[in-house]
Image (tube, coloured by chain):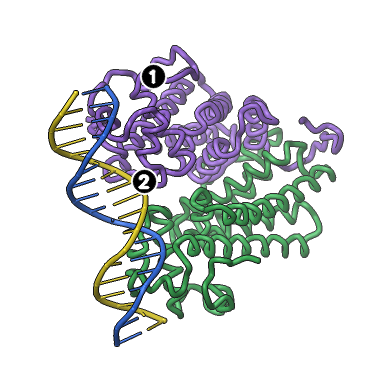
Chain colours: A green, B purple, C yellow, D blue
DNA sequence: GTCTATATGAAGATAGAC
DNA sequence: GTCTATCTTCATATAGAC
């Protein structure tokens, strides 16, 4: 029902088996996709020429068409693969965690972990939805909607049980997803902060907010973490 | 020192005088810019042909070059105009409000107000930085950095005075700016929520967080605002 | 499977008449 | 100021040899 633009190899597990972590691409097909990820993220879909993708993969532009039907198919495969992965991981959290608070904590951590591990891929998902043509767009947006609905389910559940403050569920989910997604824009692996530190900072901000309320037990100076 | 790509009319106030609010564009120059805003936002900079911008403005493509040096100049003018407006409004808040809490409240409200009033313009600023060439990019990013620094100044001040929780200032500013910026992506004027409702929801989320802590004075059901 | 060669179209931009 | 006509470049994509 899907993958109408895939030509061959529909069972070759594009980055799926996950035996290795970040090593060299094995097949030419994977090399093409890796190059596409790199250049779509750097210049944008429309500004990234197929010739450059081919050169980066070590082949001629025409050879890409043996592996993929067209340029659009590259974009769709990138988005599909990683949106599915994101959804699958959240579904697992929903299965394993019963309580809204644990679910939300895990969801935030999971979201940030994936968006930092696959920075470029999720950056593309975040910025190139407009570049999808026709049914591709509907399909990817349905995957995104599914993710949003799961997050909204967590929020609704938490509000009904009195664990989260009453708020607008849709708007809260947008705010939350957005701020966690944009980590893919500014995060630099090996930079000042570790992934876990970012997760902790975001969890704190989302759950407890910025305001020192009542307790005032917050030493005002000298305890910054660097 | 700037506007090297503007051809003529450097004093014609591109949407600046603000006598009218959202009326018909007066000059051809403004009609071109309005069309560019529309199409850059809808299809992206690279995917929006100059010919279509011209048609929407009621002229031929070649005529654009009488008013603007090239396509890139359209993008730069859009981004420059509205980033300056955003910065100016925040600077005014800094001048008028002394306390960090009032400043942050006003900053959030101001950010959301501008990002909903000029949805397309700020959506372009948010998504087309990559399309800027050479020095244009440095220039616009400097404007954006200035805005971030002002927000960070508010946060630092508030943390030092014990009004805000201790947290990482940069990360907090990114999270905060990002979530407010993305309102431009999903907000629909005349939709379910008013601008003011969105401002209230975001302020609450940012300042107080999602968690019902201690007090538990939050009736769990039947009090949703629609 | 990958190549060279090329078809085909569309883009941004310019020239020069009016 | 705006037009028509056109230049030039570069894109995606295809054909067919190896």
Q: Share a chain, discs 1 and 2?
A: yes
From where the camera sits, is residue B104 visible?
A: no
Q: Residue A86 in the image: state x and y as whole percent.
A: 63, 61
Q: Is residue B123 left or right of residue D15?
A: right
Q: Position of residue A205 (x, y in %)?
A: 62, 44
Q: Quadrant where the N terminus of chain B lies?
A: top left
The residue pinned by badge 1 equals B16
Q: How far apart are the two marked residues, 1 and 2, measured between alpha carbons?
A: 24 Å
Residue at 48%, 73% in the rendered image: A22
Q: In this orientation, which residue lies closer to the viewer: A184 or B47?
A: B47
The kind of secondary structure element at disc 1 is loop
Q: Dot 1: few (<14), some (14–19), or many (≥20) neighbours within 10 Å?
A: few
Residue position for label 2: B131
Q: Position of residue B118 (x, y in %)?
A: 50, 28
Residue A168: give x, y in percent of width and height: 73, 37
- The answer to whether residue B197 is above or below residue B11 is below
Q: Is residue A24 above or below residue B196?
A: below
Quarter of the rendering occupied by the C terminus of chain B: top right
Q: Is residue A6 visible?
A: yes
Chain of the residue where label 2 is placed in the rendered structure: B
Front residue of D7 and B110: D7
Answer left or right for B189 relative to A125: right
Q: How many marks?
A: 2
- Mark 1 or mark 2, earlier in chain: 1
In percent of the image, x 86 and y 34: which residue is there? B222
Q: Chain of mark 1?
A: B
Determine the residue positioned at 82% across, 38% down.
B216
């Amino acid at each position: 029902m899907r993958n109408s633009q895939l030509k061959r190899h529909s069972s070759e597990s594009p980055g799926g088996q996950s035996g290795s972590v970040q090593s060299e691409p094995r097949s030419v097909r994977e090399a093409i996709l890796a190059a596409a990820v790199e250049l779509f993220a750097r210049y944008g879909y429309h500004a990234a020429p197929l010739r450059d993708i081919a050169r980066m993969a070590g082949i001629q532009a025409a050879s890409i068409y043996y592996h993929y039907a067209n340029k659009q198919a590259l974009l769709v495969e990138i988005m599909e693969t990683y949106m599915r992965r994101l959804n699958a991981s959240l579904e697992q959290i929903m299965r394993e965690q019963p309580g809204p608070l644990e679910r939300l904590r895990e969801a935030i951590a999971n979201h940030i972990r994936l968006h930092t591990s696959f920075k470029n891929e999720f950056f593309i998902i975040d910025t190139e939805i407009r570049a999808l043509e026709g049914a591709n767009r509907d399909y990817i947006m349905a995957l995104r909607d599914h993710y949003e609905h799961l997050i909204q389910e967590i929020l609704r559940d938490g509000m009904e049980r009195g664990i989260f403050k009453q708020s607008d569920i849709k708007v809260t989910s947008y705010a939350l997803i957005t701020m966690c997604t944009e980590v893919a824009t500014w995060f630099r692996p090996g930079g000042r902060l570790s992934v876990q530190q970012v997760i902790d900072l975001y969890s704190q901000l989302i759950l407890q907010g910025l305001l020192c309320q009542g307790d005032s037990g917050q030493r005002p100076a000298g305890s910054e973490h660097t």
